[in-house]
Image (cartoon, grey):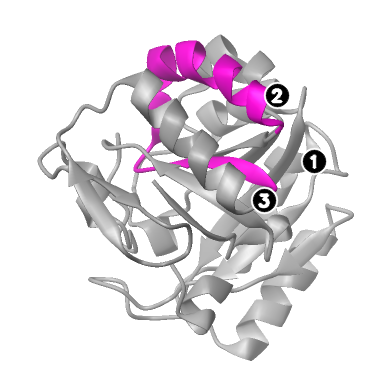
Amino acid sequence: MFSSVQGEGPLIGYRQIFLRLFGCNIRCDYCDTPDSLENLAPCRIESPPGSRQFACRPNPVPAGELLDILSEMNRQTRHHSLSVTGGEPLLQADFLKSFLPFVRAEKLLIYLETNGLLPDRLAHIIDLIDIVGMDIKIASSAGIPEDTADIHRRFLEISAARRVFVKIVVAGPTTEYEIRSAADLIAGVSAAIPLVLQPLTPFGRARDTASPEQLLRLQSAALERLEDVRVIPQMHKTMNVL
């Protein structure tokens, strides 16, 4: 758990408390949080907020202790929201179902960052979420060959009950066909749902980022179907913050 500014999507620049939960149901080529994939390391708690100074506690940390830490962080520095991220946080939907109601007392919005592949688990907690940041995984950047369109569509239909935007990481091999297909999927729920095209930040196996000209072509392709399409890079990488 740490305090920083949101570096991705339309909430970019807002101060958030980040709760990073372990575990993920997929392995994207560009994943920049490999430590979140396994339940091996201790929990790292930042104190004071924004200091990059961390103390370690054994996992799992009891929910009451996490709530106390969150309350103290928010007391020291005012935050816009709690970002529940991972890995894939919906793998721990039962924990979130019991934990998030207590976060309401802190007057924080609850922002879920998710790969958009676990719709049944989202349905379990959607009433506790204010904002959904949902990925659509495409083969050219994520390296996931399975057709996930039907799952993403169900997930987006559930998410539409809340404020939601979709993010797609785009790389050098990403095609206009992939982006048009994703835009069609989104428009089938609502053409007003914002889409963020996020240029791949080279990391691990993923090195081939999109060119500026390609980004503009992909944006134009998506704008044929959608009302709100933005190109937003990972700004926390540029700012060198967590």
Q: Residue at x 58, y 67 (%)?
A: 198
Using the image as rendered, state which of residue 62 and residue 206 is in the foreground: 62
**x and y percent of residue 157 in the render?**
70, 24
Q: Which residue is drawn at 47% across and 49% down?
A: 137
The stretch drawn in magenta includes residue 138: no
The kind of secondary structure the magenta stretch mainly shows is helix
Place residue 143 in its image quadrant. Answer: bottom left
Mark before the other along the chain sequence, 1 or 2: 2
Residue at point 30%, 57% (across, down):
33
Q: Nearer the viewer, mark 1 or mark 3?
A: 3
User: Real-space Cα distance between discs 1 and 2?
Assistant: 11 Å
Of the numbered discs in the image, which one, if any, rests on residue 187? 1
Could you say whether the residue bearing mark 3 is in a helix, strand or loop? Answer: loop
Residue 102 percent coordinates (x, y):
56, 18
Q: Residue type at mark 1: give it.
A: Ala
- Residue 241 point in image, percent of width and height: 46, 73
